[in-house]
Amino acid sequence: MTRTKKISSLLLLCCLAAFRIQAQEVLYDQQENNQLGAVKPAKVKPKRGGALSLPFMDDFSQLSKYPNATLWADSMVYVNSTNVDTTTCGWSNNLPVSYGVATFDGLNKYGVPYDTLVTSGAHGMADSLTSQPIDLSGKTLGDSIYLSFLYQPQGIGNAPEPNDSLCLYFFDGSNWIWEWSVPGTNIQPFKNKILLVPASCYTNAFRFRFINYATLTGFNDLWNLDYVRLNSGRNRNDTLLNDVAFQVLPSSVLKQYQSMPFEQFNGFQSAELAGQLGLQLKNNFNSLRNTNYNYRIDELLGGGNVLTPGNASFNFNANSCIHLLIPNFTPATFTGNSALIQTTGYIASQLGDINAHNDTILHRQLLSNYYAYDDGSAEKAYGLLGAGAKFAYQFTVNVADTLRAIQIHFSHFNTDVQQKFFSIMVWSGISAGSSNETILYEEDFIHPSYVDSVNGFATYVLQNPYLVSPGTYYIGWLQTYTDMLNIGFDLNHDASSRMFYNTNGTWQNTLFHGALLLRPLLGSAIPNVAGIDHPVETPSVAVYPNPAGNQIRLAGVNLHSGDLMEVLNMLGQPVLTKTPQSPGDQAMEVSSLAPGLYLLRIRSGNRVMTSRFVKE
């Protein structure tokens, strides 16, 4: 996206829809000038050995990020329960029919763009999902074999554009044959598609394959696929899903977080546990169903049952969903130094129910050594525009501990930021509407880093672990360049009241609802931490204005002729020098500097004084 005029210090969120200004925050649409190339699916030889038999069905209700290898021959799509609308029943028509979908995007199985050069406008064949060979030999048209599936553009991520598409191909034993496609559009409710498999495909090596055509530079142009069914004895009207299913993952057992350090949880359960948990079910039958369900919460690392198992029954209206609340619970006493809490829901078998896989749902939450407001999945990317912009994330510490690392997920969104710099920051005393802040820790010259895994986190181990006492801390970054860093943003959990940004000297609470994929790691096992001073520099000279325009001036020091003023870039290279000509010559022209973070070094006699400043 080319900008023809300067944008200074604006908060950005990478997402879809429109480009609009809202106070100092901007919703940013990824403008893509894509050209649909004539890319044909690569030929795949049928799998040797035993082929699958009918029926074939997958609703992607699994814990793995990758497709079930017994059903699918490739693993490029992202299986998840997060790129879907998860609102409470009645608030949206875009919810899935059951939990779990396969998401097609512009990233490969490792979470890396298909175009690793991040070429502007790169577009073509991206993810594929190919069935294992299915034996249809001996079948006739009288067997009436149909393939059906549900699909949805966008989910809650980036919308596919009209020149993007989701396509379906059939393999007749020799060739891949185009069968169906749909162009991109903004989010719509899941649609059901059913197609007759032609007799030419009745071989012992029949396959079908879904492919999306997308921008190849990131998590772009999304499609959700669900409930793939292939069977005989069907007709073109056979689209009713006779299934009672869990619809979304259970809610968190924690009041604020998706995860937190065990040492910060144990002993503080009454304050940290959620008052109640939610389970959401969907009746996809076209008739009322009397439904029984059970639930339990267990600690899997030795703590045993946390919640006494319970059950309930109710009359479930046709084609409707229901949000059920699990009552308050008190956890058992935990042992060890971590906990893995599993919430489990069960639906009793229903007469005529076609799918038992989604009758059980599991949600695991690890209490180990990190805080997380996010669920580990990034639906969008978040950033700040402007050199010197700052972001702060609020966390509360219950007992004294040691901050030892920061984890950040940098999302691939049409640009590579690995050559940029930023500073890791820890503050206290931040509040919306105030310029007050106390710097507790700062570590400079940090590069963003991409991790080759789906939603992978880069871990930045602090050079000097920092002791934290009970209280509230703000962990984030100071930006060196004007460019946004594209940090993952989870839309399924809302930590907006704990997210703050500063682009003009005043801290503001974000207007975006979601949770940043940034996690502080704590641990008391780091050796030799007692008495360590945090490495914050107290500048021996003040620079103003800061951020600077064309000129900077000094305060708190009297320069003399023969002293030396140097400006160093973030690589430590001198880019400007000046020798004062007379006492009181305290100003320095910096108009030639590119926007960014700089170090001013003053040599006066035997003294060396430094200070940082930002050039706008």
Image (tube, rainbow, N blue to C red):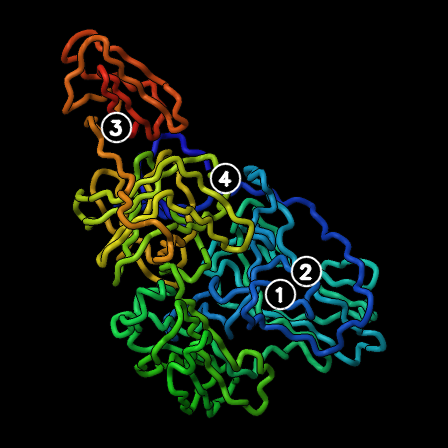
Kind of residue indicated by mark 4: Asp
In space, the residues marked 4 and 2 are separated at their CA atoms by: 27 Å
Residue under label 2: 74
Residue 299 locus on image (x, y percent) = 42, 76
Q: Quadrant of the C terminus?
A: top left
The disc, 4 or 2, on the residue closer to the chain's N-terminal end is 2
The amino acid beneath tag 3 is Ser
In front: label 4 or label 3 = 3
Amino acid type, residue under disc 2 in the picture: Asp
Locate residue 40 relative to residue 405 in the image: left or right. Answer: right
Quadrant assignment, res 373: bottom left
| Disc 1 residue type (three-letter) | Pro
- Sequence-earlier tag: 3 or 1: 1
Instruction: Classify mark 2: residues with Cα within 10 Å, few (<14), some (14-19) or many (20+).
Output: some
Above-or-below relation of 551 to 520: above
Looking at the picture, tell me which residue is in the foreground, 100 or 425. Answer: 425
| Residue ID at (45%, 59%) | 376
| Marks 1 & 2, CB-CB < 8 Å contact | yes
Cα gap from disc 2 to disc 3, whole angstroms: 54 Å
Residue indicated by mark 3: 611
**Which label's residue is closer to the chain start, 1 or 2?**
1
Callout count: 4
The image position of residue 262, as x and y in percent, is 36, 66
- Marks 3,1: beta carbons within 8 A: no
Disc 1 and disc 2: Cα gap in Å? Answer: 8 Å
Find out whether the residues at labels 2 and 3 contact each other: C-beta distance under 8 Å.
no
Q: Which mark is residue 561?
A: none
Q: Earlier in the sequence, mark 4 or mark 1?
A: 1
Task: Tell me if I can see residue 240 in this picture.
Answer: yes
Disc with the residue nearer the chain's start (4 vs 3): 4
The tag on residue 67 is: 1
Q: Residue 416: which numbered mark, if any?
A: 4
